[in-house]
């Protein structure tokens, strides 16, 4: 049970940084660059996308044993298109301004590679609960990415945030950078954020050999460079293993990888 809860929590949070659909997996870039001219548009697109992703994952996971493999992809597209139609009607009815701003990118959610990818890679192979967690995590990550891009472009490009004028961006002070509201500015912001998320991934999730390796489990180190951390650590703790890797215990001819001592016959 604990393992199942841990798995579900991982599926929920992985989409925020580690497998962020936009900044790490680089999926859904077309709507992201097109609609993130404002924070409101980015948030609205993210919410609509997340609703479709959650519902499509639920339906596809529930029907995964019923849908024949030969018509799997057409069935996915039909399910997703039906959900997108519902979302489009709701936007037209309750938020016509947002619907007009997002335009063609709402119907294009039908063929969004993130939704199709999660349906094929996850919902088709897992239960309903796990598929919901996966959809919420990926949807949240995509929504936060769109909101972040939209906020940066709106604040720096127009001097507003959700339509509210920023007091520190005004005439005579820090002036808006108009290019950030254009497609070129969108690519620039996107590139910077991709670099930031890659750095975060490298810092938080990359393996650190010095932290996870020890001489008892990995005794094959023969170079002075790789031995030095173990020598200093074990000497400080006065462990008995320090004797085995003390200076001089490794033959001089074997201190560099690939080298071996030559016999007197080989030297001749």
Image: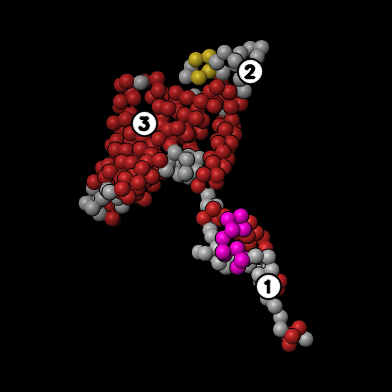
| Residue with the mark numbered 3 | 48
Neighbourhood count class around disc 2 (C-alpha, 10 Å): few under 14, some 14–19, many 20 upward: some
CA–CA distance between discs 3 and 2?
Answer: 33 Å
**Residue 205 vs residue 71, the one in the foreground:** 205
Per the picture, the main secondary structure of the magenta-coloured stretch is helix
| Quarter the C terminus occupies | bottom right
CA–CA distance between discs 1 and 2?
Answer: 67 Å
Name, please, the residue furthest toward the right. 268
Relative to 150, does residue 10 appear above or below in the rendering? below
| Residue with the mark numbered 1 | 251
Which residue is found at the position 55% from the left and 22% from the top? 155
Which residue is found at the position 53% from the left and 14% from the top? 165
Which element carries disc 1, helix, strand or loop?
loop
Asked if the stretch drawn in magenta spans residue 125, the answer is no
Q: Earlier in the sequence, mark 1 or mark 2?
A: 2
Relative to 174, does residue 247 appear above or below in the rendering? below
Residue 231 falls left or right of residue 123 = right
Foreground label between 1 and 2: 1
Residue 148 falls left or right of residue 92 = right
Q: What is the count of numbered marks?
A: 3
Q: Earlier in the sequence, mark 3 or mark 2?
A: 3
**Residue 76: image x %, image y %?**
31, 45
Which element carries disc 3, helix, strand or loop?
helix
Whether residue 87 is visible here, answered yes or no, is yes
| Residue with the mark numbered 2 | 175
Which residue is found at the position 49% from the left and 24% from the top? 38
């Amino acid at each position: 049970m604990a393992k199942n809860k841990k798995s579900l929590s991982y599926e929920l949070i992985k989409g925020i940084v580690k497998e962020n659909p936009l900044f790490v997996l680089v999926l859904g870039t077309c709507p992201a660059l097109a609609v993130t001219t404002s924070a409101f548009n980015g948030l609205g697109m993210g919410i609509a996308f997340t609703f479709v992703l959650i519902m499509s994952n639920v339906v596809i996971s529930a029907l995964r044993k019923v849908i024949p493999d030969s018509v799997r992809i057409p069935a996915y597209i039909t399910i997703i298109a039906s959900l997108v139609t519902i979302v489009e009607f709701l936007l037209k009815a309750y938020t016509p301004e947002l619907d007009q701003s997002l335009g063609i990118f709402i119907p294009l959610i039908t063929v969004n590679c993130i939704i199709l990818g999660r349906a094929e890679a996850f919902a088709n192979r897992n239960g309903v609960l796990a598929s919901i967690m996966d959809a919420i995590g990926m949807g949240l990550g995509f929504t936060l990415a769109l909101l972040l891009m939209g906020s940066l472009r709106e604040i720096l490009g127009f001097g507003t945030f959700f339509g509210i004028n920023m007091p520190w961006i005004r005439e005579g002070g820090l002036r808006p950078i108009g290019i950030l509201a254009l497609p070129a500015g969108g690519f620039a912001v996107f590139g910077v954020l991709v670099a930031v998320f890659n750095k975060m991934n490298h810092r938080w999730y990359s393996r650190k050999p010095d932290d996870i390796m020890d001489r008892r489990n990995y005794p094959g180190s023969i170079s002075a460079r790789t031995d030095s951390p173990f020598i200093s650590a074990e000497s400080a703790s006065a462990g008995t293993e320090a004797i085995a890797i003390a200076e001089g215990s490794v033959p001089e001819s074997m201190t560099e990888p690939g080298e071996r001592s030559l016999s007197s016959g080989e030297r001749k």
